[in-house]
Amino acid sequence: MSRLWKLCALLLVAVPTLAAKETPLQSLDWPDTGTPVIRFSFSKFKELDGNSGKQRVYIDDVTAVNLSNKVLDSISLTLYVFDKAHVRIGDGLINLNHVQPGETIRFELTLNVSGVPTSVSLAANTRTLSITINTVPQGAEITLDGKDVGVSPKLVDVTLGKHMLEFKKDGYNTGTFPFEMGPRDVDGGSLSYELGVSALDTIELRDGSVLSGDLVSINGMEVQIRVGGNVRAFDRNQIKRISLTQRQQPSQ
């Protein structure tokens, strides 16, 4: 009985050890000099099944904590991956936007490497690529990651990583478009976005001009159109073509 009691006691002591929380592979503060503003914790790398050849794919669960008392609008970092001999075997990108003070963010990284990763380091991502952003039709206001960059077509510089574009143009519904720039992309690329169906009616005049507005009324001799909040009247003989946008019936 005494031996059995000792065995049970050993098992009871071992259980908490097995259930202990897994410690992170590595924690890094950025920047590594001065006062850090964000802390990254990297878990142990997990290799995906089906890898073959020299290139392998790993995933890593990352936690980032804003250590400052300010909103971090945009953080773009390059993650360098090393093997046990501290030879660099791959890299990845980390982009964080609008991180609130004290906020914790968790995300997953997918890394293509040429060995077995054992450690990482961080560096500010300063590389930018030039890309021409266009819209159909042209003349739309462009917002890149929440910042106004001009009117299409527009040549802009973007960092590596994931980004979000937003387009606005009078007479058209607002559009958004996510895209990503990778390490193998080169300068001089282009991106085109079609604004889609107009939110306003389109009136083409016989002199070649085109108006976007709301058709107010039409009769045998006159057409009334609301343009920019003002109602304008046109002789029907001035009108070449009217295109009406589809509208939803008002709820009863």
Image: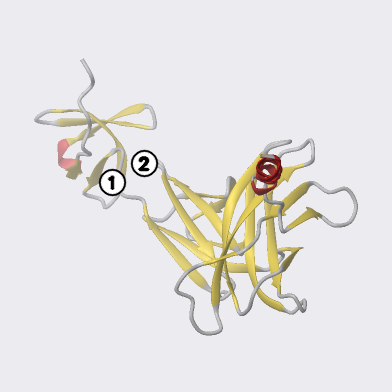
| Mark 1 Cα shell of 10 Å, populated few (<14), some (14-19), many (≥20) | few
Specify few, some or many for label 2: CA neighbours under 10 Å numbering under 14, 14-19, or 20 or more: some
The residues bearing labels 1 and 2 have C-alpha atoms spaced at a distance of 7 Å
Residue drawn at x 28%, y 46% as measured from the top left: 197
Name the side, left or right, on which 204 lies relative to 79.
left
Q: Position of residue 115 (x, y in %)?
A: 63, 78
Residue 183's spot in the image, x, y percent? 59, 72
Return the disc, 1 or 2, that comes first in the chain's sequence: 2
Left-right relation of 69 to 3: right
| Outermost residue, right side | 34
Marks 1 and 2 in Cβ contact (< 8 Å): yes
* Residue 1 in sight here: yes
For the residue marked with disc 1, what is the amino acid? Val
What residue is pinned by disc 2? Answer: 173
Q: Residue at x 35, y 41 (%)?
A: 171
- Residue 179 pos. (x, y %): 48, 59
Q: Identify the disc placed on residue 38.
A: none
Amino acid type assigned to the residue bearing label 2 in the image: Asn
Secondary structure at numbered mark 1: loop
**Quadrant in the picture for the C terminus:** top left
Would residue 185 be seen by someone viewing this image from the given angle? Answer: no
Q: Position of residue 89 (x, y in %)?
A: 67, 77
- At x 71%, y 75%, the residue is 83
**SS class, disc 2:** loop
For residue 240, above or below residue 251: below
Q: Viewer-proximal residue, 65 or 95? A: 65
**Residue 230, above or below 57:** above
Identify the disc placed on residue 197. 1
Q: Nearer the viewer, residue 244 or 180?
A: 180
